[in-house]
Amino acid sequence: MRRSTFLAFVGPSLFMMVVFIATPLISVLWQSAHVTQPVFEEVTIETCSPGFMEQICTTEVTSRPTFDADGKPIKETHYVGFDSYREMLQPERLSKAFSEDGGGFSDILKIDFYKALRFTLTFTLITLPLVVGVGLALALAVHNTIKSLRGPIIFVSLLPFIITPVIGALSIRWLFVGDGILTAGLQHLLGYEFSMFAQSWTIEVLMMFYRVWHVAPFAFIIFYAGLQTVNQDTLDAAIVDGASRWERMRSVIIPHLMPLIIFVSMMHLMDAYRVFEEVIGFSSEAHVISLQWLTFDLLTPDNTGNRSISRASASSMLTMVGIVLLLIPVLRRTWQDHKRS
């Protein structure tokens, strides 16, 4: 292929990647190392009140923001280096927690970043095998059923994936919150009252259940498409050789689907590590937060209208680093398979 032809095909994609990926990433990196604050000036205010013989005056020194000729607040940007990352990671409190007088992991989980990191990692690593396992089980079940039922089963199975994530999370929450239908049914069966939203672990279980219910159809349809390309002659030969169903699964089907399993795992790792809709839909901020929600919270204006853009940018960069670290084992496996082929 000529270089001009290659550039004609690759150029638009490279341009879009630079504009929509590289440029925002550089901008976030720059914002994480700089802090923009309004400029304040000290003003002396004298307040006088009438007295019996003479006025009683008090002087107070206060600060107020300065404005330019157009009436807009004047702001200054300062380079702070890794201070924003230090505020997020808080290494001093981290080292103190592991000291002799520290409280260990209980003290660490009181820091917002580590509290969010703990849930994000737990959520990602637990839902990953469940999504892959449930998706593969559904694909095998549909593949082995009669052809007349495959269409309706596929349609019903894809419905959870079509629902908007926040709407789906709200629907699950309404089933269990307060006197929801499922909560009332469980209370009637068990004979005592309980609340699914009174402690963090039950909320996490519901959030993981929803994620598996919502994402497993995506894995199912990918694996089902892969099963259509399995070499039937190889399966027939395995049956003739006396291989059991599990041996055929382990030696023929799983190796054939391994590239798709790696693809689904990569997509799920990137998506689950950015968990956000579940935190909003289940209103779990008081008990459970994620790294993506922490970034959102830092960008929310406070009572004075200020936003912690520098710390939010640092949180975003740390989230991206976490995604890269999680993808390294999967990418290494892909590269090794490519070299062997």
Image: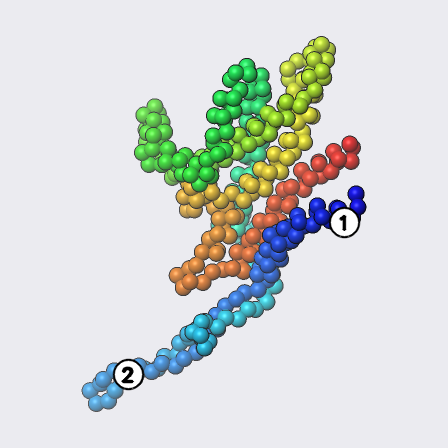
| Coloring basis for residues | rainbow
The location of residue 249, given as percent across then percent down, is 65, 20
Q: Is residue 129 visible?
A: yes
Q: In the rendered view, tell whether residue 272 sits above or below residue 138.
A: below
Q: Which label lies toward us, 2 or 1? A: 1
Q: In the rendered view, tell whether residue 338 sits above or below residue 237.
A: below
Query: Where does label 2 land, which residue?
Result: 48
Could you tell me which secondary element the residue under label 2 belongs to?
A: strand
Q: Is residue 209 visible?
A: no
The location of residue 28, given as percent across then percent down, is 58, 57
The location of residue 33, given as percent across then percent down, is 59, 62
Q: Nearer the viewer, residue 42 or 218?
A: 218
Q: Residues within 10 Å of mark 2 (few under 14, many from 20)?
A: few
Query: Where does label 1 land, which residue?
Result: 4
Instruction: Please state which amino acid type lies under the numbered disc 2.
Output: Cys
Q: Residues within 10 Å of mark 1 (few under 14, many from 20)?
A: few
Q: Quadrant of the C terminus?
A: top right
Instruction: Report the residue at 64% width, 15% height from top.
Output: 245
Instruction: Report the residue at 32% width, 25% height from top.
Output: 188
Which quadrant of the view contains residue 90? bottom right
Q: Nearer the viewer, residue 212 or 102?
A: 212
